[in-house]
Amino acid sequence: MSQTTVKVHNEHTRIDENYTGVSLADLLAKYGLPADQAHHHQMIRSYLTAEGTDKYYVVYSVAEIEPSAHDATVIVAISLNGKPLDTDGKLKLIDSADKKPQRWVRNLTAITVKSVE
């Protein structure tokens, strides 16, 4: 899949970092949940959880990852500054708009999408 690079400031380390990976919106679209204006009603009724091996998990509204509705870029990163993630596992969820990395998920193991009806 197409790779995206985001530059973020990690408030924990106080360092600017460049993560590269797949857009979460593109990943969801590949598995049947297009995050675009044509599917607006489905998006605003859907949310996802992302979980790491340490059982840390976060929640996102699907609309938060849709580029025409939100300025942030949310990616499933595979590299940091051009190198494999190393201590953060093979996959890490990164949100370019979060001021603190509290919704970043290292050692990402699962993304589950649910709809509220």
Image (cartoon, rainbow, N blue to C red):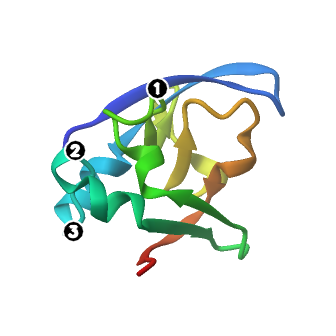
* Amino acid type indicated by mark 2: Gln
**Rendered view: 56 above or below 86:** below
- Front position in the image: 98 or 63: 63
- Front position in the image: 53 or 97: 97
Q: Mark 3 and mark 2 in contact? Answer it, CB < 8 Å.
A: no
* Amino acid type indicated by mark 3: Tyr
Instruction: State the SS at label 2.
Output: helix
Q: Quadrant of residue 31?
A: bottom left
Of labels 3 and 2, the one closer to you = 2
* Amino acid type indicated by mark 1: Val
Instruction: State the SS at label 1.
Output: strand
The Cα atoms of the two marked residues, 3 and 1, are separated by 23 Å
Percent position of residue 18, x then y: 52, 24
Residue visible at 50% across and 57% down in the picture? 61
Residue visible at 46% across and 26% down in the picture? 6
Q: Quadrant of residue 59?
A: bottom right
Which residue in the protein does label 2 denote? 37
Q: Residues within 10 Å of mark 3 (few under 14, many from 20)?
A: few
Percent position of residue 66, x then y: 35, 43
Looking at the rendered image, the quarter that the C terminus falls into is bottom left
Which residue in the protein does label 3 denote? 31
Question: Tag on residue 6?
Answer: 1
